[in-house]
Structure formats: C-alpha cells, structure tokens
Image (cartoon, helix red, strand yellow):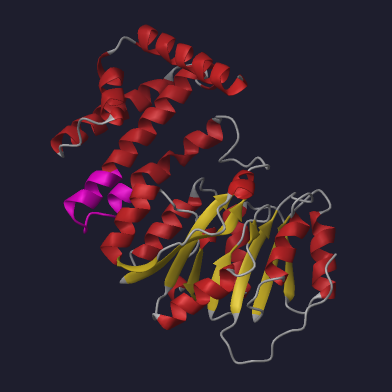
C-alpha cells in the first residue's frame, strides 16, 4: 500500500475521478495508486463498489480509511452505467474524469488534460491511449501533437478512430449536466460520447498516450461472442441518428460504421449457431445488412472492403458464405498459434 499523500490546499479546480469497481481485486490497487500518484493532486476520488463479490470492496474500504480524498459508494450490483451514474450524482469537482478499475493512468495525465482545458477554455479534452502489452516498446522520445478541433472535426475523428471510451477524456462539470449513462446498455460509451460532442463547439486533443488500457482482464467487450454482444447493436444505429445535422462525409462515416457492425454480427451469428437455434437473429441481421447496403450505395459508399463484404452477404448462398467464414476462422487461429 502507498504512503499517504499530502493534500493540496490551493485554489486550483477540483477534479473528480470516478472509478466503478466490480470484482477487480488483482488490478484495483494499481489503478487507485496511479490516481493518488498524479502530479496534479487537487482530486476527489470516488470509488463505486458495484456489489463486488471478491475482495475489491475491502480494498476500496482500505483506501477510503487512509486517504481523505477517497470517497466510497457501496451499492447492489447494477452494472457499469449505474455505477458511473452514482459517481456523477455524488461528485463535486469542477472537472470530471472516469477510470476503469482494471486500467491505470500515467502520472501526468490529469494535469496535462486539465491545463490544456483551462488554457483553451475547453469543456472536453481527450488523450491518447496505450495498451498495457505495448508499454515495453513505447517510444518515450516521441513528440506528440496537441490540437483543438471544431465540433464537426471532433465528430468525424470520433467516427474515424472509433475512440468512444469515456475514460480517455476530462470534462467540465457543466457539460455533463443532465447527461447520464443508460442503464443496461452495452457499449454505453458510444451514446455518452456522441451526446457530449453534440453539446460542445470545440474539443481539445492531446495525442500522447496518457491512459493505460489493461489487456489482461476480460470484460464484455473483450470476451467471446454472446447474446449480450448482440444487445450492443443499438450502439451501431445511434451515430447515424445523431449525426443528421452534420456534413455528408460525417453521415457517410456513421452509415459505414453501421454497415460494418451489422456484417460483424451477421458473421458471428453464423459461426455461433448455438446462439441462434431458430435462425431468427441470422435472418434479422441479413435483412438489416441488405437494407444498409442499399443506403450505402445511395450515399456512394463503395469500393471498400466492407462494401465488398456486404456484397457477398447479399448475393452468396448461405452455405457457401458460412463455409468460407469457417475456413477464415481456422486460418486466423492457425496464424495466432504460430
């Protein structure tokens, strides 16, 4: 356990760090320590223990008892969105950021994001992310860009890079007024981040990877395909419905992502027949792929690998299509093995 830190008494903005916690005993101390050891120390850390059944709750309680800046909320398990909403309800910071409890921060993340936000009067600033498996080969001498982009530029880059995760950003508290995560939704960050961008006129971006994404742990986004992942389909349609006010290129990108996502689900369902005994999901996804394929053609979204995939879904007999999918899966597994 770390030594106690001395709390800052200056008048700098208070930053609330919301950490939803659920059964992460092997990673939680590292996460909390990375927040406590930030170069910016006017912090309020809100740990939301979402009904953990391992020793995560005890770890949270220890940090709460040892550090005045750590607050603890214990609640019945309600899922990630409910836990984050509880943190939002109880936070008192001028700025807010989120950290997943199996990830961690580089020491200067909060200071860099906050300084950039204040210096440029920004309501939202994001930073780069590095996977934990890539830390050893990181180039520490690399010079990273920082820039400010308009709302349209921010939305296009969001859809281009699909960097929806909320934990890579810092937010001015006023921006998040009346914004909450939708309970029970998979890919909840898609809805939240798009709603945020639709409320700002500009966003800051620091390309330096200041947030470390843990690739050791298994979450719903990294676990094998399941019925839960089918529920994430709603997040595919949201960018299309919420970008109607933007230019054609942004609309194209949103529709492209929808087509790509529908094809992904169609392929996964074909390869996991045990999840779709009555073929209802397969038929539904194929119908949606064909419908979106027509829209893509109408928007001139063509001559792309995803477009050709949609073409195959549209015109290839199901038995042949599934056979080639299975061959490709074997090829991928063989490549990963050797």
**Boundaries of the magenta span:** 239-254
Q: Is residue 115 left or right of residue 132?
A: left
Tell me the quadrant of the picture where the C terminus can be found: top right
Q: Where is residue 65 drawn, in percent x and y?
A: 84, 73
Q: Where is residue 21 drawn, in percent x and y?
A: 70, 56
Tell me the quadrant of the picture where the N terminus can be found: bottom right
Q: Where is residue 59 drawn, in percent x and y?
A: 82, 60
Residue drawn 79% across and 51% down?
Answer: 25
Pick whichever, 250 or 132, lies toward us: 132
Please indicate, yes or no, whether residue 183 appears anywhere in the rendered image: no
Pick whichever, 285 or 20, lies toward us: 20
Q: Where is residue 76 drawn, in percent x and y?
A: 72, 56
Dominant SS of magenta comes to helix
Q: How many numbered marks does the figure carry?
A: 0
Relative to 73, does residue 92 appear above or below in the rendering? below
Give residue 175's quadrant in the image.
bottom left
Query: Per the image, is 245 magenta?
Result: yes
Give residue 4's quadrant in the image.
bottom right
């Amino acid at each position: 356990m770390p030594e106690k830190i001395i709390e800052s008494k200056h008048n700098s903005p208070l930053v609330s760090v919301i950490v939803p916690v659920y059964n992460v005993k092997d990673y939680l101390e590292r996460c909390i320590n990375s927040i406590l050891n930030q170069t910016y120390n006017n912090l309020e850390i809100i740990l939301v223990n979402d009904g953990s059944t391992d020793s995560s709750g005890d770890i949270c309680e220890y940090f709460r008892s040892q550090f005045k800046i750590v607050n603890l909320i214990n609640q019945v398990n309600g899922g990630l969105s409910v836990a984050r909403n509880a943190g939002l309800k109880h936070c008192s910071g001028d700025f807010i950021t989120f950290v997943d409890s199996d990830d961690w921060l580089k020491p200067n993340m909060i200071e860099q994001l906050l300084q950039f936000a204040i210096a440029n009067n920004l309501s939202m600033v994001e930073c780069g992310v590095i996977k934990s498996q890539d830390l050893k080969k990181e180039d520490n001498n690399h010079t990273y860009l920082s820039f400010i982009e308009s709302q349209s530029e921010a939305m296009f880059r969001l859809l281009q890079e699909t960097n929806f995760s909320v934990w890579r950003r810092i937010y001015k508290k006023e921006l998040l007024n009346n914004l909450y995560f939708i309970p029970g939704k998979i890919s909840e960050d898609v809805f939240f981040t798009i709603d945020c961008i639709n409320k700002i006129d500009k966003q800051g971006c620091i390309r330096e990877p200041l947030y470390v994404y843990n690739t050791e742990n298994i979450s719903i986004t990294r676990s094998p395909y399941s019925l839960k992942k089918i529920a994430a389909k709603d997040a595919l349609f949201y960018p299309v419905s919420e970008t109607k006010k933007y230019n054609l290129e942004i609309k194209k990108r949103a529709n492209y992502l929808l087509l790509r996502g529908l094809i992904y689900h169609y392929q996964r369902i074909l390869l996991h027949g045990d999840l779709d005994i009555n073929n209802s999901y397969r038929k539904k996804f194929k119908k949606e792929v064909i419908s979106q394929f027509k829209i893509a053609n109408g928007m001139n979204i063509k001559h792309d690998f995803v477009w050709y995939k949609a073409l195959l879904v549209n015109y290839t007999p199901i038995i042949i299509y599934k056979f080639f999918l299975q061959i490709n899966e074997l090829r991928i597994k063989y490549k990963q093995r050797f």
